Image (cartoon, grey):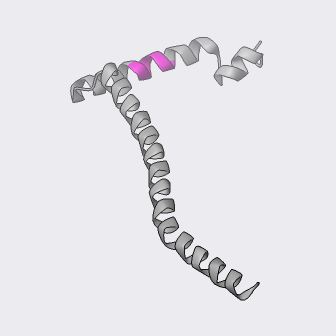
């Protein structure tokens, strides 16, 4: 069963992959602990990242609305004057 679906999924013998992942997790955990980083910090910072991207998206939509209104304040009166002058000429 060296080429079974589980071995292909793990990229090697499942037992060996689990041992390697455990050792790497221990090393990374020690480094993060020395840096004062907790798992909660990582989750909280990821949440802040997602919220920041989310808020930036809606802020961009708000900016589009402001740009639309700013342009409409100029474009609509010009269009209206042009339409009224054409109607006066019978076009």
State yes or no: residue 17 in magenta: no
- Left or right: 77 in relation to 91: left
Residue 16 percent location from the top left of the image:
57, 15
- What kind of secondary structure does the magenta stretch mostly adopt? helix
Of 25 and 83, which appears nearest the observer? 83
State yes or no: residue 22 in magenta. Answer: yes
Q: Which of the pair 43/56 is nearer the observer?
A: 56
Q: Position of residue 2 (x, y in %)?
A: 75, 16
Q: Residue at x 45, y 50 (%)?
A: 62
| Left or right of 19, for residue 55 | left
The one nearer the camera, 84 or 34, is 84
Residue placed at 55% from the left, 77% from the top?
78
Question: Vertical placement of 3 versus 35: above or below?
Answer: above
Q: Quadrant of the N terminus?
A: top right
List x then y, in percent, for residue 83: 65, 77
Q: Nearer the viewer, residue 17 or 9?
A: 9
Quadrant position of the C terminus in the picture: bottom right
Q: Residue furthest bottom?
A: 89
Quarter of the image where one finds residue 44 = top left
| Residue at 50% over, 56% down | 64
Q: State the extent of the magenta-drawn residues as a range.
A: 20-25
């Amino acid at each position: 069963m060296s080429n079974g679906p589980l071995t292909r999924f793990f990229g090697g013998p499942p037992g060996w992959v689990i041992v390697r992942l455990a050792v790497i997790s221990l090393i990374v955990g020690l480094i993060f602990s020395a840096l004062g980083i907790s798992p909660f910090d990582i989750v909280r910072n990821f949440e802040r990242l997602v919220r920041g991207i989310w808020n930036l998206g809606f802020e961009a939509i708000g900016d589009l609305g402001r740009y639309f209104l700013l342009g409409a304040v100029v474009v609509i009166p010009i269009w209206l004057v042009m339409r009224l002058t054409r109607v006066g000429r019978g076009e």
